[in-house]
Image (cartoon, rainbow, N blue to C red):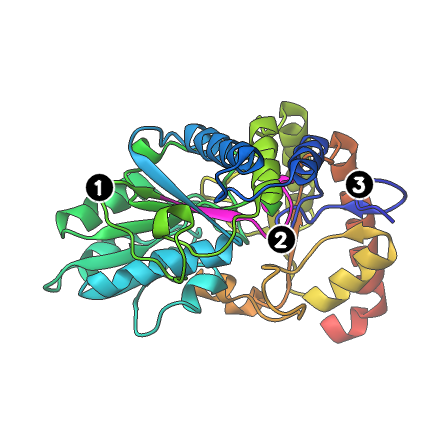
Amino acid sequence: MSVSGGDILYLDHAATSPLRPEAREAFLRAADMGGNASSVHSLGRKAKMTLEEARNDILLHVGAIGIGGLVFTSGGTEANALALHQAKGYDYTVVSAGEHDSIYGAVSGAGIVPLKAPGEVDLAALQSLLGRDGRPFVSIMLANNETGVINDIASAAALVHARGGWLHVDVVQTLGKIAIDFAELGADSLSLSAHKIGGGQGVGALVYNRDHTLKALITGSGQERGMRAGTENIAGIAAFAAALKACHGMPDDLCSAQNSVEAALKALGVTILGAEAARVPGILYIAQADWASNLQLIHMDMAGICVSSGSACSSGKVKSSRVVTAMGRPDLADKVLRISSGWTTKAENWQRFYDVWSKGYEVYLKRHAKELV
């Protein structure tokens, strides 16, 4: 059954968002056209034009025209790996405690910037970590993929650049939700992913400041100006750009519906992770100390509602949240549920989620009343 129709309610857009109609159309047009962007014949030139138009559209959307270059990748994970590959030219690496698993998988021996209780990066701790000699490579995400909490990237950039460093920013969960301006952020690179905005899986990009010389992670041929070997996925790239052009932020009625559900959940005593910090719309991360994540997921799935317990990049397992532990709440790390809306979501879907979740919690409490006393 399609995640965008039928009786299933899909509220796991932070894991992946269904393919948008605009992206599907762009994909099919490019796929039917054929041609390799490295070929010099007419079809190759058409493919090259599609590639460069998509590159320009994406750079425009993130405010990087004129100052940024862009390398297409297989997704956000590869974009992060390509960014961290640049750390080899720096003296030491620092990452935040809230970074995506793909960042931790691409670096070892890094200094860790702790999170404050509301979920944002502790900038005072960052400044302290940058007090050592040498040039740092720093990675701090714009919005956390579990909580949606937004970090003050411009302030972090000022600290990093004062030490002659590079600041990489993962904007995968921010893209399409709020405006992104590469120049205003002051970052040196951004990682993007198509499938979080309905652009299809297997496509991403690294935007970088053209004042830097980027070192290729995948070598062997000259595609992407020599910065990423391998034939470009023209159809996927065209779909990515089309999906991004179709993004216009979160509609007011969805934001209002989410706010109403959050208020109702708080009235039940539910903890909303990141509630005291600025957050991107469309991500709600809740915890209830009496109800384990796996039991919540089973209840919601049986009711036909797709949600998650946190990051989707954990091999399909339900495990304790590293981010929640870093926020100082290890007691809630295996009690969390992430609800995330997107382009297929309607305002009334938020109410359906609340009705199903609250009923399940009520039943759970009655069944386990003696154990919880």
Q: Earlier in the sequence, mark 1 or mark 2?
A: 1
Q: Count neighbours of disc 2 (C-alpha within 10 A) and say few if under 14, some if 14 to 19, many if 20 or more.
A: many
Secondary structure at numbered mark 3 = loop
Residue identified by numbered label 3: 4
Q: Which of the 4 image quarters holds residue 186?
A: top left
Q: Which span is picked out in magenta?
A: 196-207
* Residue at position x 76%, y 75% in the image: 371
Residue 148 coordinates in the image, percent (x, y): 52, 46
Secondary structure at numbered mark 1 = loop
Residue 51 coordinates in the image, percent (x, y): 50, 37
Residue 37 coordinates in the image, percent (x, y): 51, 42
Tell me: 127 left or right of 118: left
Q: Which mark is residue 286?
A: 2
Question: How far is the residue under mark 3 from the one under mark 2?
Answer: 24 Å
Tell me: 235 left or right of 226: right
Residue identified by numbered label 1: 211
Question: How far is the residue under mark 1 from the one under mark 3?
Answer: 42 Å
Secondary structure at numbered mark 2 = strand
Q: Inspect this view and state whether residue 354 appears.
A: yes
Along the line of sight, the residue nearer the viewer: 130 or 230: 230
Kindly check if marks 3 and 2 are in contact, taking CB atoms under 8 A apart as contact: no
Tell me: 27 left or right of 154: right
* Residue at position x 25%, y 58% in the image: 137
* Residue at position x 66%, y 71% in the image: 317
